[in-house]
Amino acid sequence: MSVPVSATRRGFLRGAASATIAAPMILPSSVLGAEGTTPPSERITMAAIGVGGRGTGNMRGLCGFKEVQMLAVCDPVLAHRERAKDHVNQRYNNKDCKAYVDFREIMIRDDIDAIAIGTPDHWHAIMTIEACKHGKDVFCEKPETLTIREGRAMADAVRRYDRVFAGGSQRVLGDYKNWPELVRGGALGEIKEAFVACGGPSGVCNLPEEPEPEGLDWDMWLGPAPWRPYNSRLTRGGFRPYRDYSGGGMTDWGAHRFGAATFAIGVHKTGPVEVIPPDGKDVDKLTFRYANGLKIYHGGTGNITYKGTKGELPGKHGELSGPVDMERYRGRGILGDFVECVKTRKRAFRDIEIAHRATTVCHLGNIAYWLKRPLKWDPDKEEIIGDPEAARWLDRPKRGTWAT
Amino acid sequence: MRYSRLTTTVLVLIAVAGSIGLAQDVDLKKTLDELLPAMNAEKIPDRSNAEKKWEEICFQLGAPGKEAQRSEACKLMVAKVGKDTPTPVRLWMLRQLERIGKDECVDATAALLDDKNATVRDAARRVLTNNPSPKANAVLLDKMQGTGERDFKVALLNSLGYRADPGSTAAAARELRNSDRAVAVAAAATLGKVGDVAAVNALVAARKKATGDLRRCINDACLACAENLLEHGKTREATAIYKELNKPEEGRTVQLAAMKGLLKAAGK
């Protein structure tokens, strides 16, 4: 991002001084670390950026951890940020939570250790990268990326500054019973095929123009996305079907389910070598072909279906002979995993590299759907082979002064 | 958002249906002429259908082996991006050119960088940003150096960074000394993306006097350059950058990144 924020460190300190003056005179015992609570000096101080529906859910969840102290919220929608601020203040029984329209004012706060991003997808890369530059850890709602190149840039920034990044796909481990263990543990033999059901690709946004409501910074909501007039559906969580902001159902539930399938099969650190869209003749489902012959199809009758040499899920399969050695959460759920990793500096279950690889599968599927032609993919170099125009979809130029 | 199985099926069927027999024998001029009025229609479904139909054609014309048709479609669109065309249509044409336009659309798009409509101007910039023609880089470079409008200069620098063409290094290096901090920050980010030795030299030279957010951005660009150099086997050059940044005055975040880089450069 190129335009520095006008807020200054001094400005922030002034704000903090005002907050101190306004603070209640009687301090709650939790502030002093009494009664088994974590003293402030040992807490992970956080800000929640993007506090609509999902972002608020994550923020509330994080506020539930005794190790976390939420200090700020940010959203271009006034009602969102006021609601979020009120929740945080109620949670801590004070008035300390500050509310921002511009996330860059949070980035320059040295007293904030980590951020939770709950914005639409078109903001994830810019915010993640900026947070890393400022030494902050990141919890980012899924789908973690809007384009494949954004994912790589995010991974580079996370590694460069040795930050903890956790993507918000709680379903990879949480939703599919013990299937990840069964598949990874070999109860189905070698997996030859998997079917992943989720929505289709995003497309053109032609929602009608509506008058901008008071308290909304529409330019900030759009940020790096191409300019278009306001429509209330977009700020109420209805942005997913539109390509400028999201990859549609393919990346929404796809980030969970392709993430889960590739994790269970053990191809979550690589990618397909070919993506073949349906052609109305020989191919009836979008097909991801992997170098080892594995095929993952988009579609099917359940959430995820596995077919191996020794069994199927759902269906008959073998049993596990012992515990399965695979990655698991380090804390309670996906949020607890993040909190634990911030404390221990270990890599999260949904580390950026895993998140990037999972969403790359979805993005490649979208590109193949949009362009209606097969794509050859080099998962090591992360390049589309032999189709320069398709390769132009790996990233998108951003609006105005925004850049990753 | 929950997508039902029915929605999935419908979306996939739409995708399949659209893939059958399109674009192969389409009379592009006739098709575009027919669709253009609807692209400016009052009724959203009419406009949307026309836009989608033309977009679908453009997507397919980007396929290998359809170069002549792609070029023809781009020339037809270029003829419609001028001020006589309604703005929504201009913007839609520019969107398509952003994805499939090449050499043939550079001149016409370059002219739009001076358009009175800021949205058109920015859309034109994005077309050139994603255009593989070297001519597009030259246009962006020229415009960046010529404009006195702060935000536009920053946006053009970002475009040059997106393209990461080493030909942009000298001009971006000059902007590192721009008294407007936002411009200097964008120049630093651009140099970090180009990542060659000349970019590093400019960044290191500017770093000494830089403070605050500019210094942070220069440091980040230096680290990106070091990673790039390391990847290309230039260990000595990368190590020099990491040593330069491995100092307490750079702050904990940067110093740790530099220390990590030094270890990596040493093969540890």
Image (spheres, rainbow, N blue to C red):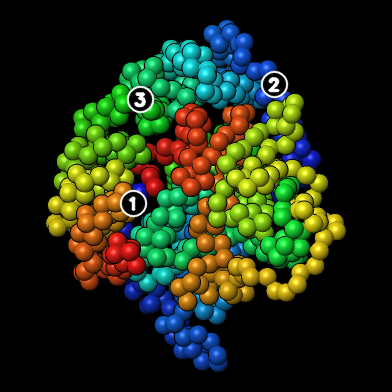
Q: Chain of mark 2?
A: B
Q: Is residue A87 visible?
A: no
Q: Nearer the viewer, residue A351 or A10?
A: A351
| Residue, far bottom | A35
Residue B126 position in % (x across, y down): 40, 32
> What residue is drawn where x is 29% and y is 61%?
B265
Q: Nearer the viewer, residue B51 or A187?
A: A187
Vertical comparison of A364 with A178: above or below: above
What amino acid is at disc 2?
Ile
> What residue is drawn where x is 30% and y is 29%?
B137
* Residue with the mark numbered 1: B231
Q: Earlier in the sequence, mark 3 or mark 1?
A: 3
Mark 3 or 1, closer to the camera: 1
* Residue with the mark numbered 2: B20
Cα–Cα gap, marks 2 and 3:
31 Å
Residue B252 position by quadrant: bottom left
Label 2 Cα crowd, 10 Å radius (few <14 / some 14-19 / many 20+): few
Residue A124 position in % (x across, y down): 49, 52
**Disc 1 element:** helix
**Disc 2 element:** loop
**Disc 3 element:** loop
What amino acid is at disc 3?
Ser
